[in-house]
Amino acid sequence: MKSVLLIAGEKSGEEHALSFLPQILQQDQELKFWGVGGDELQSSGLELIYHLKDFSSWGIGEVIAKIPFYLKAEKRILEEVRLRNTKTAILIDFQDFNMRLAKKLKKMGVNVLYYVAPQAWAWKPWRAKVLSETVHTLFTIIPFEKQWFAERGVKQVRGVIHPVLLHYQKYLNNLPERTFEDMNQECRLLLLPGSRNFEVQNLLPIFLETANLLKKNFNIKLSLVKTTSVRNEIYEYYANHFDQIYNSEDLTQALQDAHVCLAASGTVTLATALFEVPTVVSYKGNLITEFIYYNFINYRGPISLTNIVHDKILFPEIVQYAVTPTNLHRQLLPWLTNKASYGKIKEELHLTKSKISGDPFDLPKYMLDVIHGKN
């Protein structure tokens, strides 16, 4: 019986794995998958030697505190690889741990399938060289990454469907029509101020002031999506400003209802693109974050996933001290006043789905071929 190591050290990694593991096991029930994951992966057939809740960490301080645990876990995983005679590993995202592990697995003769390429083009570009020397196949989720890594020596690179598309795919074929004329009657403005306390505290007051500026000339219906990761009292303080408040599980409905959006930079901005909601993206971090960005990160391209995917600025990006009600208002105004402008960005956003659908190949079969030495 062949054994396969799978590392999904975060919940997002588990969701990635669930897009292919059940199909693999359905096609080959003799395989034994083991490693790191959560309850859903365990139910799908993964033998857990660590639960992802033990692996997950947040912030530099927590990562540093868990270094002894990660070193011990790595040692145990490598020992299990020897004991089980494992010849294939699927490492999903979780870059700092998995990149280090990949190098050691390669030395043991293990074929490494690395799922979700690290954003080396933005941070630590030397990782491309490490990947070129250690992985059998690298799977990317952003269109330009495939060529970027190939040009830097990674021999086999495959594009796979982006997890955000995977999550929302069933809702995208019949999006409700939201016309410029309807928006002129009642503009439904959605606020997505982030999923962390500091983001919401920084951005929500500015977003609300922006909405008040718009209300001087437009009939604005204001909505908010609140997340469980943010303290509820932060939302309660502003609750009377909204016509509708959605919970995080109702994000799909909120996106279907909205004409335009103000959002914190993050994965959710790719969701607004898929639902064809023109969005102004904001980021307002602390001084330490700003210092690190300007002194240690060479990347100076777009910050919004939508703009990165399209390789052009579709969503205006307002950062740091420029995040003011006046600036946000100025960026929203063309969509609210010009039918051609609103229609043009909606047409561009309609292409988002095709850009992140991945290469046309059978992912479970490809992985099976590698596991069985056919590829």
Image (cartoon, rainbow, N blue to C red):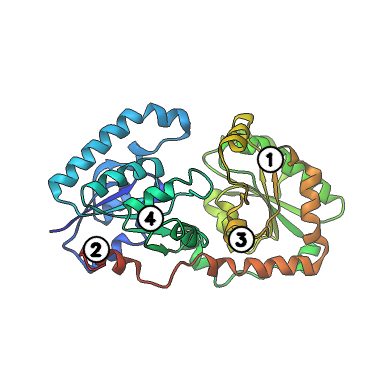
- Identify the amino acid type marked 2: Leu
In the image, what residue occupies the spot 35% across and 44% down?
98
Task: Measure how far apart labels 3 and 2 are at the Cα level.
Answer: 37 Å
- Identify the amino acid type marked 4: Tyr
Q: Which disc is residue 204 wearing?
A: 1
**Judging from the image, what secondary structure is the residue with disc 2 in?**
helix
**Judging from the image, what secondary structure is the residue with disc 3 in?**
loop
Q: Earlier in the sequence, mark 4 or mark 2?
A: 2
Q: Which disc is residue 311 wearing?
A: 3
- Identify the amino acid type marked 1: Leu
Give the labeled residue for mark 4: 115
- Kindly check if marks 3 and 2 are in contact, taking CB atoms under 8 A apart as contact: no
In the image, what residue occupies the spot 33% across and 54% down?
135
For discs 1 and 4, the disc positioned in front in the rendered view: 4
Task: Measure how far apart labels 4 and 2 are at the Cα level.
Answer: 18 Å
Q: Earlier in the sequence, mark 1 or mark 4?
A: 4
